[in-house]
Image (tube, rainbow, N blue to C red):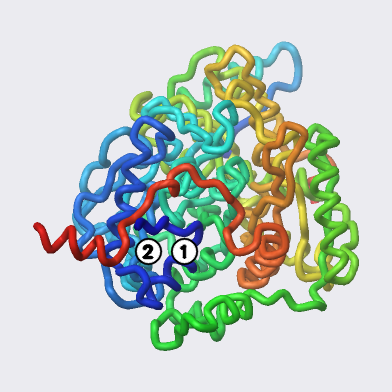
Amino acid sequence: MNAQTRLPENSLSPSPADAVRTLLDVQGIAVSGAEAQALAKTLERLAPTPETRS
Amino acid sequence: MNLALPNTLVELRRRIVAGEVSIAQALHAQQANMALDAGRWNAVVNLAPDTRRTSGHEGSLAGIGLAHKDIFWVGPSTPGCGTGQALPAEPGRAESPVVRRLEQHGATTLASLAMAEYAGGVTGENPNLPLPVNPLFDNAFVGGSSSGSAVAVAAGLCYGSLGTDTAGSVRVPAASCGILGLKPTKGLLSSEGCFPLAPSLDTVGLLARSARDALQILAASLSEAHRATVLPGIQTTDASLNPANWYERLNADLHLPGGIRVRYCMSHSNSRFNLADDQRQAVESYISLLGDDLPAPAPVSLPLLAEWGRLASIVLHAEAAATHYGALQAGTGINHITRFTALPGAAIPAPWYAHAANAAHLHRQRFIDETLAGADILLTPVFPHGVPDWNDVLTTSSTFSPMRLLGLFSWTAFVNYLGLPAIVFPVGRDTRDRPVCVQAIGRPHSERLLLALAHHHEKQHHGDDGFVANLPALSQTLPSRDQHHAQHSCL
């Protein structure tokens, strides 16, 4: 868990997978590129949506 | 002349109380049964090396052999948790009070049973152990994480088993093998002495072939205070037992009150998890029959089902990451399935987890007030597309379908988030002749009512033999009382 997770807002930002990889790297958790991509998709699936922000 | 072991725990107990079978005979036959697993179903991890401490001669489970998921600390033994070896000893670690209570009521622990590694999988896939074999259909998958428990009970290796359920890990394996699985109200059965996965969701539950058997196991599992609250009037001592009115009393214990109100939901708010036609037909047929004896079940929608599933996933991943944080950092010590469960939790923002955890009680109350809305039970499907083949859900298979895997707990995980009791039991067969189960969800501490609902169907459609009629392991026989005495007098 980390309160600083942020997904990129434009194409100049790191990709979601890169952001996740960096986030885990600072915790000492190494992940492969494929794992980082899968994690980014999982986080996207788990993210609050406008309907669930209440 | 040989006497076959009966299909149900309660019938074996009747024979013991009536003096038709001795406790020693019964245990001998059950131990022999458990040994039949070798090379057939891959349910057993370890046979209990010494049953002396557990073979009580008094109590409601005297002479009954049980076997449990290899996740409990039992006596001096350390569980393996599906790692393929015993976990390191932890001095001072308390043993499971639930297992201990069963033994105090006379049950004998026969074996520890296979499971997904660290309870982290929704199937029985575990690279550390042989793939479990479904006793009903060779190609059918076995649900996890309490995979060995489901296989052992469905094969007839034992009469019942404790498992743990974090997102469906009792109900999914039970449904995959066509037996009964009960996830009690959160906290009803202590999780002490049980290796954690996600403590906010982890629930000790049980698997059995009959609702009457399940009631006996549940009654013996509970603390006296909980038993008085949840199962008032249920006796766990021999003093009240009378073979002459055995089934009359047992049926009365699980009488389904005629005024019970049932609601049902067949549509998932995530359309990918809606039911296949044959699943829908089987569940609808059951609901229709239920209306013959109860007020007509009423449909209800679950608009928050996907949201509850999302919140459950957040809590599961976050707490699993905390449980296995050291292994995630080390990059070793857990297999790819456990890692898949835990790793997302290390990247989940803390506010997501805090929000999900803090909102659980509000959602539970909303479920009670709005979904049940004065009713007693909500019925749902279990598997939207039926019991899949191993090849569909095995992560190493070339035809692996992630969506089929996610579908397996699409109707169960939210119940853990809400902390409510739920039961699964078979109500029909699909076009492949595989079992179709329903899930019944109740209000907190309504376990007796849920068992009564299962018993109502079981009694009408299966008689006194339980949900599984043909048990491979129970083709074995035990010697008659005279033969047993003769054999032992020769030693």
Q: Which mark is residue B64?
A: 2
The image quadrant that residue B131 belongs to is top left
Tell which subunit mark 2 falls on: B
Q: Residue at x 72, y 32 (%)?
A: B432
Give yes or no for contact between labels 1 and 2 (Cβ–Cβ under 8 Å). yes
Q: Residue at x 58, y 26 (%)?
A: B139
Q: Which mark is residue B200?
A: none
B450 lies above or below B47: below
The image quadrant that residue B93 belongs to is bottom left
Mark 1 surroundings within 10 Å by alpha-carbon count, few (fewer than 14), some (14 through 19), many (20 or more): many
Q: Which mark is residue B9?
A: 1
In the rendered view of the protein, which quadrant contains the C terminus of chain B?
Answer: bottom left
Query: Could you tell me which secondary element the residue under label 1 belongs to?
Result: helix
Nearer to the camera, B40 or B12: B12
Q: Residue B361: in sight, yes or no?
A: no
Amino acid on which disc 2 is placed = Ile
Image coordinates for residue B171, horizontal then vertical, percent: 59, 49
Amino acid on which disc 1 is placed = Leu
Q: Work out which residue is located at the far left of the displayed protein and give it.
A: B491
Tell which subunit mark 1 falls on: B
Q: Residue at x 82, y 78 (%)?
A: B259
Image coordinates for residue B356, horizontal then vertical, percent: 65, 50
